[in-house]
Amino acid sequence: MKSTSGYSVKYLRANDYIAQVVERWNSFAHKRQDLLGFIDVVGIHIDKFGVAGIQSCDRFDINRHFDKMKESCEVSVLVWLKAGNSLYFHGWDKLHRGLTRLRIVRVVSDNDKLELIDETDIEIKTSELNKGKIVIGEVKK
C-alpha cells in the first residue's frame, strides 16, 4: 500500500476539500512528527466550519493510535475540538479484487472525555485511487 496520508489527501480532494499532508520527517530525531502530535493531514471544505484533522493509518491500528493520542496529547486534542475543528481517523487496508477499504472514525469529546464514533466503511478501486481519482464502491456498514 502506498502512503496512507497520501490516500487520505486524495480522498479529501475528491470530496471537494483543500487538503495537505502536515506530518513531517524530522531528520534530527529520525522520526515522523505529526502536527500538534496527532494530525497527519488537514482538510478545509467551503461548506463546513473549522478544519478537519486526519490521523491516517492502517485500518487495524486505529485503536492503538487513539490510545496513544489520549495518553500523549489529550489536552491538545480537546483544545482542537473545542475550537470548532473536527478530528477523524482514516483507517486504510487493501482488499482482494483490486479494492482498497477506508474506515472513517470520528473523534468526539463528551464532557472532556475522548471517544470514537464509527462513521462509515467505503470500498474504493485501488487502481483509480493510485491515479488520484476516487471511484467509490459499495458502502459497507
Image (cartoon, helix red, strand yellow):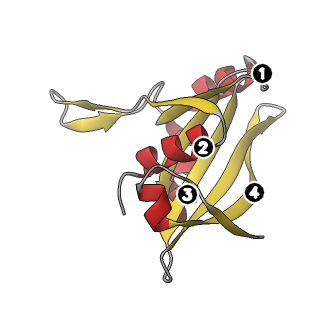
Q: Which residue is mark 3?
A: 91
Q: Are marks 4 and 1 in contact (CB under 8 Å)?
A: no
**Is residue 40 visible to us here?**
yes
Horizontal arrangement in the rendering, residue 42 relative to residue 24 (left or right):
right
Residue 130 at x, y percent in the picture: 41, 57
Could you say where residue 99 lies in the image, as x and y percent from the top left? 52, 73
Whether tag 1 and tag 2 are in contact, CB under 8 A, the answer is no
Q: Are there few (<14), some (14-19), or many (20+) residues within 10 Å of tag 1?
A: few
Instruction: Find residue 32 and report its horizontal and vertical position in percent.
Output: 30, 37
Res 68 visible = no
Return the residue at label 2: 14
| In the image: residue 43, left or right of residue 56 | right
Q: Tell me the SS state at disc 3.
A: strand
Sequence-wise, the earlier of marks 4 and 1 is: 1
The image shows residue 99, relative to residue 18, as above or below, that is: below
Secondary structure at badge 2 equals helix
Q: Which mark is residue 9?
A: none
What residue appears at the point 61 percent right and 25 percent down from the top-left corner?
Answer: 75
Identify the amino acid type marked 1: Phe
Q: Residues within 10 Å of mark 4 (few under 14, many from 20)?
A: few
